[in-house]
Image (tube, rainbow, N blue to C red):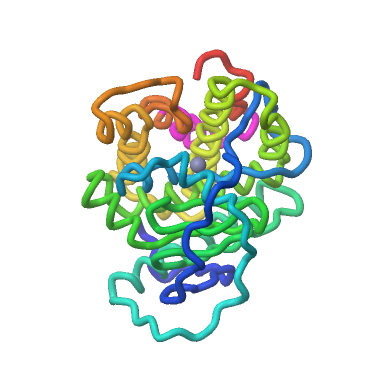
Amino acid sequence: MKWQGRRQSSNVEDRRGQGGSGMGGGGINPFLLGPLVKLLFSKTGMVIAGVFIVGSMIMGYNPLNLLGGLLGGGGGQGLTSESTYSPTAEEEELAAFSATILGDTETVWNELMDNYREPTLVLFTGSVSSACGSASSATGPFYCPADEKLYIDLSFFEEMETKLRAGGDFAYAYVIAHEVGHHIQKIMGITDQVHSLRGKVSEKEYNLNSVRLELQADFLAGVWAHHSQRSSGMMEAGDLEEALGAANAIGDDRLQKQATGRVVPDSFTHGTSAQRMKWFKKGFETGDLSQGDTFSTRDL
Ligand SMILES: [Zn+2]
C-alpha cells in the first residue's frame, strides 16, 4: 500500500499509556439482533462489533462474556492528555498508518453520504473506557455506537500477523474500514433497527442477524476500498489478497475451530471465512451501496 505522505485524520484520540478502568462486569449482550433489517435507512442504535470476536479468540477469552462486559456501563474518557507512554518506532508507524486510513475513509464516505459524521479513532493500550463500557485489548478492535468512536490497540495488528498469519498494511486497513463500516450502519440506522429487536428473537435468530450485520460491515469496507482505489490509488498488487486473507483468517468457522477444535454454525456472529471474503469482494467490485443488503438476501 502506498499510504505514506497522505493526509492523516485529525479525529484521533491518543490514549495510549493511560489505561482504562478495567473490565466492566455483567451487562447485556449487544448483539441481540433480529430479522430483515434493511440497508440504508432508519434510526440510531447500538452495536458493539468488530473484529472483536477475533481478538477474544486469539487471547482465549469467551467473546460473549467480553461483549457483556463491554456494556457494563462507564462513561467515555475526556480528551487526550499527556502521558509518559513512549511508543516504539513501529508503533508510531502503525499510528500514522491508522490515522491515514481513517483520513481516507473520511474522504470516501464524505463523498458517498450527505452529512457524514466523521467518527473518532481512539488508540489505547491495555484497557480503555468507552461509552459502551470498559474493554481490554483482548476484545480486539471495536466500534462503540454510543460515542461513535473506534477503539484500537495497535498491538492487535501484530497479533494478526503473528497469530493469524494475516498481516500486511491492507489487511490492517480492512480492519479499520470494517469498524468504520459499523459507524456507517449506525448513521444509517441499521444498528438501531437491529438493536430494537433485542430480547424479541431467539438466540439463533439473533446470531444470524449479527452475522448479517458483520457481513454488511465487510461489504462496506469493500465499498470504501473500491472508491479509495479510484480516488487515491493507494492499493498495490497483492493488497486485495491481503484483505481477503484477513477476512479469511477471521471467519468464525476458522476461529472457532482454532479455539475449540470444532465448528458450531449457530453460534457464529461474524460469518464464515468464505462469507466474509465474498461480501468484502462484492463491495470492492461494485462500490455500490445498494448491493449491500445482507439482511434480505437468502444467499449469504
Ligand atoms: Zn464487526
Please tell me which residue is depicted at 45% across the width and 67% down the height of the picture: 124
Q: Is residue 282 in the magenta section?
A: yes
In x, y percent, where is residue 114?
Answer: 75, 50
Nearest the viewer among 242 and 285 is 242
- At x 54% / y 69%, what residue is drawn? 12
Q: Quadrant of residue 120?
A: bottom right
Q: Measured from the top left, where is residue 299 in percent x and y?
A: 51, 15
Q: Residue at x 55, y 54 (%)?
A: 105
Residue 243 visible from this viewpoint: yes
Q: Is residue 221 above or below residue 205?
A: below
Query: In the image, is 242 to the left or to the right of 30?
Result: left
Residue farthest toward the top in the current orientation of the protein: 298
Residue range in magenta is 278-290
Q: Is residue 119 visible?
A: no
Please give left or right for residue 293 compared with residue 40 in the image. left
Q: Is residue 23 magenta?
A: no
Q: Quadrant of the N terminus?
A: bottom left
The residue lying toward the viewer, choosing from 189 and 106, is 189
What secondary structure is the stretch in magenta mostly built from? helix
Q: Residue at x 67, y 54 (%)?
A: 146
Determine the image quadrant of residue 153: bottom left
| Count of numbered circles in the view | 0
In which quadrant of the rendered view does residue 125 lie? bottom left
Say above or below: 204 vs 76. Answer: above
Depth order, front residue of 195/288: 195
Q: Whole-percent x and y of residue 208?
A: 54, 23
The percent position of residue 60, horizontal first and vertical second, equals 30, 44
Residue furthest out toward the front: 26
Q: Left or right of 272: which side holds 163? A: left
Above or below, comparing residue 179 to residue 199 in the picture: below
